[in-house]
Amino acid sequence: MKEVGNKKQRRDIELLSRNYRDFKLLLDEVQGNVVSHDYRKIEAGIKIITHIENVIDSLEEDDRFIIEKEVIEGKRGNWYLDYFSASSYYRHRNRAYMNFLRCL
């Protein structure tokens, strides 16, 4: 069955989030001389990271806040309860995901 709407957005964001953090970790390891250099992979990672960060910077404040927490920091669970009510969070998250994915 084809995923639509929020489930697909959530899956896309989770995949993007993992890839972003994996590339950031790889770049940190390369800078610390922990791993050997695969320059093509490093260049691709830098481009992806730069593009994602530029898109995040272009978002409105609430959208940026949610995307930073979930994509950059990888927050899961009820992290948002200190900032939003549940219904407000889900409304903001849906808009943030839609805007973020549209800008990519």
Image (spheres, rainbow, N blue to C red):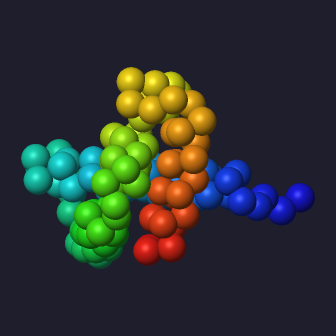
Residue shown at 72%/59% (left/top)? Answer: 5
Residue furthest to the left: 32
| Residue 39 percent coordinates (x, y) | 23, 72
Can I make out residue 56 in this image?
yes
* For residue 41, above or below residue 23: below
29 relative position to 60: left or right: left
Measuring from the top left, give residue 74's x and y in whole percent: 41, 40
Residue at 58% x, 42% y: name it.
Answer: 90
Viewport quadrant of the C terminus: bottom left
Q: Nearer the viewer, residue 2 or 90?
A: 90
Residue at horizontal 68 percent and vertical 54 percent from the top: 6
Left/right placement of residue 34 relative to residue 58 reads: left
| Residue found at the very far right of the displayed protein | 1
Q: Is residue 29 found left or right of 16 in the rendered image?
A: left
Figure quadrant of residue 4: bottom right
Taking the spot 51% from the left edge, 29% from the top edge, the residue there is 85
Kindly tell me whether residue 21 is visible in this rendering: no
Foreground residue, 11 or 85? Answer: 85
Say left or right for 83 vs 54: right
